[in-house]
């Protein structure tokens, strides 16, 4: 096999073209291949994994003399493709996260404990996103202990729990600390350390429920018009209309599969990612029409089972809830709402509030939103101003 950078670079570019990558992306790869070829001149143009590692570490821009995140990403992804071909004979174009990889504890005891916790969550059938959240906090705590030179679980004490929570305040908003405590508690329960649970209770964090205002009916009409009249792509229109009309969570929209759409009945049926409960929802004619337009005309050819795919190659499922957030905001901006920032959470609140104003009973709203418990729907009562006014008691002597 010709292992020169030039030959391997041609193979990478051909694979990108076959996968229908955009020309601008291919040009960026060509640029990286060019600079790798310059570095490879010191070894007759031959590529080795050691050379790739050296190339990927060149993250400082010669122009500015500062760290370049773009250079790190461009060089790193090229080296991943080259290494995959050298090792397997195929170019692996699967998606990789941009962010830094999570660091795991070094202590064998902590590593085994974290592995046992992961297996327990898996066996209980927790959603993947829940496992990531709970496992991530457990991992961070164990790393925090190691930073304090504690490498034995028996040596962990209540002070370390409070110290760990305090360290989170640099990255977590005060209003989100309740979520951090709630996500950390299951791990401590799993370890059966009641002393650490007692220390966690001393944090006394409170849950904050912000009152999210409803979207003005005029704004909603503009967004629907933009979706209906082709101002945005069918994919983006379908996603936004699903958020507006059903209040589906971003994780459920992202994981919605083709088999979940029942075209003749005009419904979708899915298993919720957060609760694991089945949910069937009717679709408005416009939502169904945009879904059909996307699936029949615009959806890229792909083996993926998910409905909504990336527009750019590789044509795989959307990466996470952030992709849904970006799409929804693009639609709002295209409709003329350039100063608004909305996400699926605010549209979920909006859908619930509309149902409440229409006189729907809370159990009905709870069923539509797919809540595991009907009490979860009570938070939406805060936006029903007219109903709240009827609860006001007259002040004694107010007529004097």
Image (cartoon, rainbow, N blue to C red):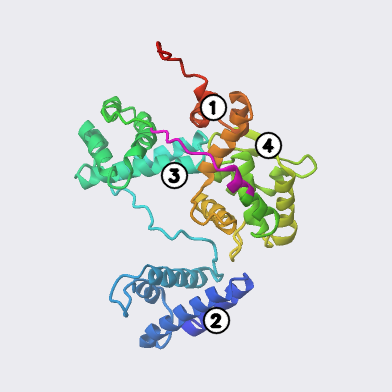
Q: CA distance from mark 2 to mark 3?
A: 38 Å
Residue lying furthest top in this view? Answer: 396
The residue at which mark 3 appears reads as 132
Q: Which residues are magenta?
A: 208-221
Task: Please rate how many residues cluster around mark 4, counting C-alpha atoms within 10 Å: few if below 14, some from 14 to 19, many from 20.
Answer: some
SS type, badge 2: helix
Which quadrant of the structure image shows residue 369? top right
The tag on residue 386 is: 1
Residue indicated by mark 2? 10
Separation of marks 2 and 4 at Cα, in angstroms: 49 Å
Q: Is residue 236 above or below residue 212?
A: below
Seen as rendered, the residue at the extreme front is 400
Indicate the position of residue 292 as horizontal and vertical percent values: 74, 52
Q: Is residue 97 magenta?
A: no
Residue at horizontal 40%, vertical 37%?
117
- CA–CA distance in space, label 4 to label 1: 28 Å
């Amino acid at each position: 096999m010709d292992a020169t950078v030039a030959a391997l670079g041609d193979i990478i570019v051909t694979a990108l073209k076959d996968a229908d990558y955009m020309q601008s992306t291919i040009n960026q790869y060509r640029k990286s291949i060019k600079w790798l070829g310059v570095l490879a001149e010191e070894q007759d143009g031959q590529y080795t994994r050691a050379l790739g590692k050296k190339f990927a570490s060149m993250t400082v821009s010669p122009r500015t003399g500062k760290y370049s995140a773009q250079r790190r990403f461009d060089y790193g992804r090229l080296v991943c493709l080259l290494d995959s071909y050298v090792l397997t004979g195929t170019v692996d174009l699967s998606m990789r996260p941009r962010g830094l990889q999570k660091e795991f504890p070094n202590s064998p005891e902590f590593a085994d404990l974290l592995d046992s916790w992961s297996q327990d969550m898996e066996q209980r059938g927790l959603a993947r996103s829940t496992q990531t959240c709970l496992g991530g906090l457990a991992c961070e705590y164990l790393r925090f202990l190691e930073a304090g030179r504690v490498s034995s679980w028996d040596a962990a004490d209540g002070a370390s729990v409070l110290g760990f929570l305090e360290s989170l305040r640099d990255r977590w908003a005060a209003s989100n600390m309740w979520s951090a405590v709630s996500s950390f508690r299951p791990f401590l329960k799993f370890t059966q350390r009641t002393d650490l649970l007692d220390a966690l209770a001393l944090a006394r964090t409170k849950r904050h429920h912000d009152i999210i205002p409803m979207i003005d009916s005029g704004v909603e009409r503009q967004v629907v018009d933009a979706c209906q009249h082709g101002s945005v792509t069918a994919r983006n229109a379908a996603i936004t209309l699903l958020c507006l009309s059903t209040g589906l969570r971003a994780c459920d929209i992202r994981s919605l599969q083709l088999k979940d759409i029942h075209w003749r009945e005009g419904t979708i049926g899915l298993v919720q990612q957060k609760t694991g409960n089945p949910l069937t929802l009717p679709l408005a004619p416009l939502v169904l029409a945009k879904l059909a337009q996307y699936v029949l005309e615009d959806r890229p050819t792909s083996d993926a089972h998910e409905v909504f795919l990336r527009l750019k190659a590789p044509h795989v499922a959307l990466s996470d809830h952030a992709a849904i957030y970006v799409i929804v905001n693009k639609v709002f901006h295209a409709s003329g709402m350039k100063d608004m920032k909305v996400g699926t959470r605010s549209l979920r609140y909006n859908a619930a509030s509309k149902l409440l104003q229409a006189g729907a009973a809370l159990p009905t709203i709870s069923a539509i939103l797919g809540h595991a418990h009907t009490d979860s729907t009570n938070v939406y009562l805060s936006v029903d101003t007219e109903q709240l006014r009827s609860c006001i008691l007259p002040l004694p002597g107010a007529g004097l």
